[in-house]
Image: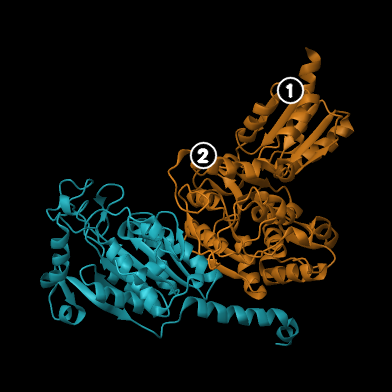
Chain colours: A orange, B cyan
Amino acid sequence: MDNRSTSAVLDSVAAMELWHSHLLREKIDQSSLLVQGNRACALGALDAGVRFFAGYPITPSSEIMEAMAYELPRVGGVFVQMEDEIASICACIGASLSGWLGMTATSGPGFSLMQEAIGYAIMVEAPLVIVDVMREGPSTGRVSAPSQGDVMQARWGTHGDHPAIVLAASNVADMYRLTMAAVRFAQRFRTPVTLLADEVVGHMRESFSPELVGRYRLTSGDFDFTPGYVHPDLAREVHPPHILGSEAHPHVTGCTHDETGFPTNDAKKSERFLHELYDKVTNHRDELCLYDVKNEGKGRVCVVAYGSCARSARAAWRLAELEGLPVEVLHLYTLFPLPIEVIQTVARRVEFMLIPELNLGQYAREVRKLAENWTTVISMGKIDGTLITPREILDQVTRLIGKYESV
Amino acid sequence: MSLEIEEFLHTERLPHIWCPGCGNGIVTAAFLRAALDLGLKRESTVVVSGIGCSSRASNYIDLGTVHSIHGRAIAVATGIKMARPNFTVIVLTGDGDGAAIGGNHLIHACRRNIDLTCVLFNNQIYGMTGGQLSPTMEVGGRATTAPHGHVEPPFDLCRLTEAAGASFVARGTAGHIRQLEKLIKKGIAHPGFAFIEAVVPCPTEYGRRNGTANAPRMLDDERTRSISKAKAAGLSRQELAGKIVTGILHEDTTAPEFLQAYTADARAQAEEASAPAAKEQK
């Protein structure tokens, strides 16, 4: 992607949009493109150099797969629609073990099917990008109602103790740049990275200007797809990758293994191996934790939000400013590894932490564990399949501050 | 053990975990001899297996080996083959791994006719977990989960894969080592999805519950029950009951192979992408 010019990016967007123009029925304008979140995700993946995609159709994520099906053969990549989500992620793992980087996209039900293989990818250190465009669950739920119900599935979905890198996109530009970040993290840490979006983020269309693309574009040094590549500063932490077809003719196994790649039953070796898998992620929390604070240090209430709720939180903050309410916003782009320091720094200075999310407080529980020594953590969960509005957040803020003052 | 197959064996990892009398070693050795005869190279050959007794074979083979998860060997192999079309990719699987939990991937790989070779070790039982019934166990067979005798009919995996679109289908037994070796060799050389069912004895988990806990006798039994495709053609359904039809059962070298079709299409797409002006003129 390093040498792709902005115009090439735009051509790519235009090609995708033109191809789907019968669905879009929108005018293509080169200066300000109206791009759907799922397409922006595909574009980010292509610009980051992803050349292998295997998937299975599921609402509300299918547009990512459709865009990849259209684009990949045109740029020397490979696309395949597999027979189910299990096969999709397994094919991605096969590609990753061959020195490529596999990517797939799905929604809750498909994400559940993938969980066993995600554990395998963690164990064999295969870099992968999995996009989960969340819809209301459990089970079939409501296919086109937004939700953030898969947060804990993204963290703990596969069995056993394991690390997880989980990002959350809140708008179309996020879908582009966080997909790139996911590719970068997957490749650097040689582990699966999950990008969470919700139905609204995946399906909404926003203007996607060249400036925006340029600003968020990572630099060329961020991606190196040389098979077997390990970033020099991680050479001590990331195990040498298994690359099929290399001279080392390796053995790859999901069994707990030692440095030879073969299974081991030695208690000390197994423990050390599992700790190493964990440590390579948690030791780099600073690098992995992407976030944004608005109105820093000026709020009595901090709204901690991610995904589409973060957008409402930002709007609520602007409304609060008009009404003279002291509110700050902590917008998290990385949910896991937990941004411990970031959350605790804010917790030390605010009276309340308010967490609006489209589930019954899955992430609020994590925040509470970290912050309850210093502040009061209030979960604001909603599971009716509609968004949390800025007004709802503002009302809650007003109640919190009012309650405090009336005591 | 003959010295020649040690070329492709991790001898330092032996002895293997298979029980005395197990046929898995015979099939693995047949595969290794086929690999040697074909002159397969370490740097371009990958063996993918799932989970189960047969899938443990990948632990002893000194080629690129992937010991994947239960039932998904073919899906992982599909990804490898698509990423590295010049590799020879072989799937070693069992009747539980390949035909029960992985049955869907098996039929879809057949349908795609992707150039993989799948050697399925059929012992009619789940050995590693201690003798549960498998989808190839015959009616009346006994297993820990069919203690009163199995009531479901088994899959005929060769008929299944042929119907699903595999362009090479064969069956051999551990009792006919040379034939099995030839079948695997032909399967690997075949351009398209090759399915080889290898009937193997499991005296420990299958045999002792079904009155045949004697390895040489089980091998003898496989030999006496085996019948060629030509001979089988003249027999009625009743006469065929209990017989093992062996040899190449289906071969079609003209069926379009998935990756070749994909690559040709992708090349056309890439050309179109690099010449957008020509498209507009149409």
Chain letter belonging to callout 2: A
Q: Which residue is mark 2?
A: A271
In the image, B180: left or right of B111? left
Query: Which image quadrant is residue A29 in?
Result: bottom right
Rounded to the nearest whole Å, what is the CA distance between mark 1 and mark 2? Answer: 36 Å
Residue A15 picture location, percent across and down: 72, 72
Of A333 and B178, nearer the camera is B178
Instruction: Tell me the tag on residue A99.
Output: none
Q: Amino acid type of disc 2?
A: Glu
Query: Which image quadrant is residue A285 in?
Result: top right
In the image, B250: left or right of A298? left
Q: Residue furthest top?
A: A407
Residue at x-position 86% and y-position 30%: A297
In the image, B3: left or right of A298? left
**Secondary structure found at label 1:** loop
Instruction: Tell me the tag on residue A375.
Output: 1
Residue at x-position 71% and y-position 37%: A339
Q: Amino acid type of disc 1?
A: Thr
Chain letter belonging to callout 1: A
Residue A262 picture location, percent across and down: 46, 53
Picture quarter with the N terminus of chain A: bottom right
Within-10-Å neighbours for mark 1: few <14, some 14–19, many 20+: some
Q: Are marks 1 and 2 in contact (CB under 8 Å)?
A: no
Residue B17 picture location, percent across and down: 32, 52
